[in-house]
Amino acid sequence: MNMNVFEITGKRVGAFRAAMEEKKVDAAVVCSGPGVRYLSGFAGTPGDASLLITQNDAYIFTDSRYTIQAAEQCPYFTLKSHPASDFHAMKEFLPAPGASVGFENLSISYAGYNKLKAGLGTDSPVGLDHAIDDLRNIKDDEEAACIRKACDIACDALAETVPYIKDGVTELEVANELEYRMKKNGASSTSFDTIVASGVRGALPHGLASEKIIRGGEFVTIDFGCVYNGYCSDMTRTFSLGDADPELVKIYYTVLEAQLTAIDAYVPGMTGVALDKIARDIIAEAGYGQYFGHGLGHGVGLEIHEGVSVSSRSTSVLPERSVFSIEPGIYIEGLGGVRIEDLIMCRGGEKTVLTAKSPKAFTVL
C-alpha cells in the first residue's frame, strides 16, 4: 500500500467530513469525476465510480472494469463492486435508516437526482453546494507539484514549437506540433482544444486552430495547456511573425502592462473583482476598454475552469494556495488581438508565476 496516497486521501476525506458536519449530513454521495478523483484518487473514466462517505466509513462503488484499478489507486476506500449509479446498493451502507444524505446538487442532472432519491430511499437529500469546490480551491503539496509539472511541460513544448511558426504553415500544423511536444514531454492529454489564432482571427478569444495559413506581418496567439497526473496547465503567448501593424504592437504592450501590474498587485485574500479592476483600468485608460470583454482569470486544477473567478462580477476571494490564471486581452474585429496568460500561486507568502519559464517580452519571430 502506498502510505503517502493513503495519508493524502485521509486528509482530504477528513476535511470533507468536517464540511459534512457543517451541512449536518450523516453521509454524502459523490459522483462527479473531479470530486471522485480529488477525494479518492480514482483516475478512471468520470462517471464510472462514485463514493459514499460517512463519518466512520468510506466506500467506492465501481464495476468489474475498474475494480483492480480502484483497489490500487484508492487504498483509503472500501471497494464495492457495483455500478457507480447503483444507489440502491449504496443504501445498505448508510449509517442508519433515515440518515440525512448530502449530494452534489450543482453537478447532477434532474434524472440523476431522481434516481439518487429513489435508490437511497430519501425524499430530501441535502445539497452540498460548494463544499468540495471550496476544498479543491486550496491546493495541497501533491496538487501543487502536479500543476507545476504540467506548466513546465507546456513551457518546454512551446519553446520547441516556436521554430515551426513560419510564413506558410497552418494554425493546425502549429497546434499539432505543440500537442505532440507536450505529450512527448510527459503530458497525458491537452487541457482543452488548442487555440492558435493568427492575423484577423486573433480577434477571436477562443479561435481554435484552423486551416488558415499564417502569413508574415501577422500576430499569432497561442492558448494551450496539458494534463499531468490529472492536473491542468493553462497559458497564452502572442508572437509577431515579422513586422506587424503598429497598432497591434501598441496593444501588445498595453496587455503586457495590464498583466504584469495585476500579477504584482495580487495578494492572498483580495477579491477577484478587485484584481480584475487593476488590469481592466489600465486597458481602459489606453482606450481599449470596450475590447476586453472577458474576465481576467479563473481557477485551474483538476479542471481547466474551477473554483475561484477573477472578473468584474466575481465575489470570489483569492486565497493562499489557490491556483488561477491572469489573462487580460484586447480583441479588435478586422485587426486582430493579443492575450497573455500565466498561472499564479501563492504559498507561504511567496508568489510564484508557474509559467514564468516561457518569456512574454514582445517577440518578433
Image: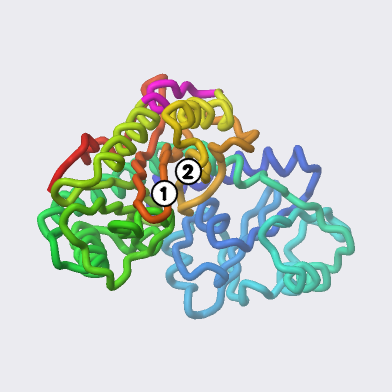
Name the amino acid, label 1.
Ile
- Name the one closer to the observer, 51 or 272: 272
* Residue at x 56% of width, y 68% of height: 49
- Give the secondary structure at mark 1: strand
Horizontal placement of 22 versus 7: left or right? right
Residue furthest to the bottom in view is: 64
Region of the chain picked out in magenta, as a range? 261-269
Which percent across, then down, holds residue 268? 50, 23
Q: Quadrant of the N terminus?
A: bottom left
**Mark 2 or mark 1, which has the lower sequence index?**
2
Name the amino acid, label 2.
Tyr
Which percent across, then down, holds residue 47? 57, 70
272 over 297 or under it: above or below: above
Q: Residues within 10 Å of mark 1 (few under 14, many from 20)?
A: some
Which percent across, then down, holds residue 6? 46, 48
- Give the secondary structure at mark 2: helix
Image quadrant where residue 363 sits: top left
Q: Which residue is mark 2?
A: 291
Q: Which residue is mark 1?
A: 332
Which percent across, then down, holds residue 275? 51, 28
- Name the one closer to the observer, 130 or 290: 290
Q: Are marks 2 and 1 in contact (CB under 8 Å)?
A: yes
Residue furthest to the left in view is: 163
Magenta-colored stretch includes residue 214:
no
Horizontal placement of 238 versus 109: left or right? left
Image quadrant where residue 273 sits: top right
Q: Quick check: can you spot residue 11?
A: no
Q: Residues within 10 Å of mark 2 (few under 14, many from 20)?
A: some
Q: Quick check: can you spot residue 259?
A: yes
- Name the one closer to the observer, 262 or 152: 262
